[in-house]
Each structure stands twice: as C-alpha cells, then as structure tokens.
Image (spheres, helix red, strand yellow):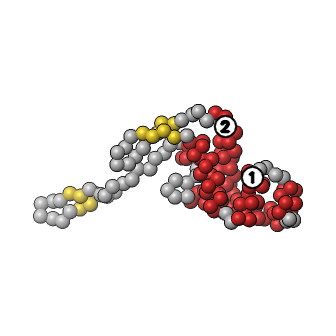
Amino acid sequence: MLRAVFRACLTGFVECVALGERTASVSWEPCYGPTGGRIFSRKREEYIADFLKVTERSLSEEEYRMFRYHFLLGASFHLCCQKLQMDRGTFFHAMYRVEEKLGRVYAELEPYPLYPLRDYFGGIAHKDIGPARSFTLSGRAPFPLTA
C-alpha cells in the first residue's frame, strides 16, 4: 500500500515536470483564516518543490543518493548498482524500503499531505474550527453546542 502511495506521488511529480513548459497556469483559490479572501498559487510548481524537499528531508544521505540516481536522473539499475557499488538484490531491497518510507511520509504529512493528489491539486482548504458556542438556560450552567 505505501509503495503504491509513493508511485502515485512520483507519477504526479513526473507529470508536473513534464508540463513545466506550461507554467503560466495560476489558480485562484479560497483562503480560509481570520480574514478569508483568495490567493494565487501555482500548484504544479508547489508540488514539485514540496515533493523534492520532503523527500530530501525524509531520507538519509545514502538513501537520497539512490533515490536521486534512480528516480530523478532516470538511471537504470545496472548503472545505479555500478555507481553505488551494490549488487542487484541489495539495490532493489534498498529501493523498496525507500519507496515504503516515502509512501508513509507522503500520506501522513501534516497539515497537508502530498497524497491523495486530488486533494492536493483540488484546492481543498481546511477551515480551522473555532471554539464551540455555548448557550445558557436561565439559572443553569452553559452547555457547549457540539455535534
């Protein structure tokens, strides 16, 4: 499951990079907060930056080297094994662990996870819930209005 999350996020990253020539698209999204309003954003560029920064922060130096060679630079496993001085089995087991680790990070990232992609690109903004309102009955303690 976690490797599937990683693959979905990687596919989204590759699509965003492929559409890099068409970066003129700016979205106009609602902004929830004390003042409300709307903001401009470039979702594809934000996703690329978030994906790379979260990946770099989550992996060790050696894991990030393997990730960079194989996924970002597109080197085959033959070249990666030669460059990293690993045998094929060790390389693939290490890559499976990296995929699983990143899948968990992408799905559990707070406050806005990278997965699912439809939520990231759909412009869903989470509204902060304020304190519960209360009402008083004549002479009784206040009761919070919660569902």
Question: Residue at the spot x=76%, y=60% of the render?
Answer: 66
Give the camera-side residue of 41 and 143: 41
Q: Which residue is mark 2?
A: 19
Mark 2: give few (<14), some (14-19) or many (20+) Cα within 10 Å.
few
Expressed as whole percent of the image width and height from the top left, the position of residue 62 reads 74, 65
Give the camera-side residue of 116 and 106: 106
| Quarter that holds the N terminus | bottom right
Q: Tell me if I can see residue 118 in this picture.
A: no
Question: Residue at the spot x=74%, y=60% of the render?
Answer: 65
Instruction: Residue 49: give its label.
Output: none
Q: Secondary structure at mark 1?
A: helix
Q: Which residue is mark 1?
A: 71
Give the camera-side residue of 118 and 73: 73
Q: Secondary structure at mark 2?
A: helix
- Left or right: residue 83 versus residue 122 is right
Q: Amino acid at mark 2?
A: Leu
Expressed as whole percent of the image width and height from the top left, the position of residue 123 reads 50, 43
Q: Tell me if I can see residue 16 in this picture.
A: yes
Residue 141 appears in which quarter of the rendering? bottom left
Point out the tag, 2 or 1, that comes first from the N-terminus.
Answer: 2
Question: Residue at the spot x=64%, y=53% of the render?
Answer: 52
Q: Is residue 123 above or below residue 61?
A: above
Disc 2 to disc 1, C-alpha distance: 18 Å
- Left or right: residue 103 versus residue 72 is left
Expressed as whole percent of the image width and height from the top left, the position of residue 15 reads 68, 41
- Left or right: residue 15 versus residue 127 is right
Question: Residue at the spot x=78%, y=65% of the render?
Answer: 93
